Image: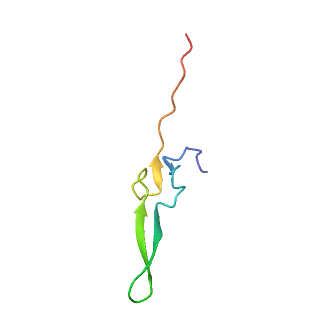
Amino acid sequence: MPENAPARVRLCPDCDGFPTVAITTGQTNSDGTRQTLTVVCRTCEGTGTVTRRAAVREVSA
């Protein structure tokens, strides 16, 4: 029987799990293909996931 434990990692909120994208520059190479830049998400550093932070408890006085 499976246990209900929260996941230790979650999708990156900035890239939504798509950490690497190719962006066209609008220019073409000599063979006719488009020039692209590969960009990696700065938040998750290209993994697509971030570690889950511990819940913060509010203490009432």
| Residue plotted at (43% across, 52% down) | 44
Is residue 29 found left or right of 18 in the rendered image? left
Q: Return the x and y of residue 15 as percentages of the image width and height.
A: 51, 55
Q: Return the x and y of residue 23 as percentages of the image width and height.
A: 47, 68
Judging depth in this view, the residue of 24 and 17 nearest the camera is 24
The quadrant of the image that shows the C terminus is top right
Residue 13, compared with residue 54, is above or below; it is below
Residue reaching furthest to the top: 61
Residue reaching furthest to the front: 27
Q: How many marks?
A: 0
Q: Return the x and y of residue 55 as percentages of the image width and height.
A: 51, 32
Q: Return the x and y of residue 50 as percentages of the image width and height.
A: 46, 49
Is residue 1 found left or right of 8 in the rendered image? right
| Residue plotted at (43% across, 73% down) | 36
The colour scheme of the drawn protein is: rainbow
Residue 19, compared with residue 6, is above or below; it is below
Judging depth in this view, the residue of 3 and 24 nearest the camera is 24
Judging depth in this view, the residue of 34 and 40 nearest the camera is 34
| Residue plotted at (43% across, 58% down) | 47
Residue reaching furthest to the bottom: 31
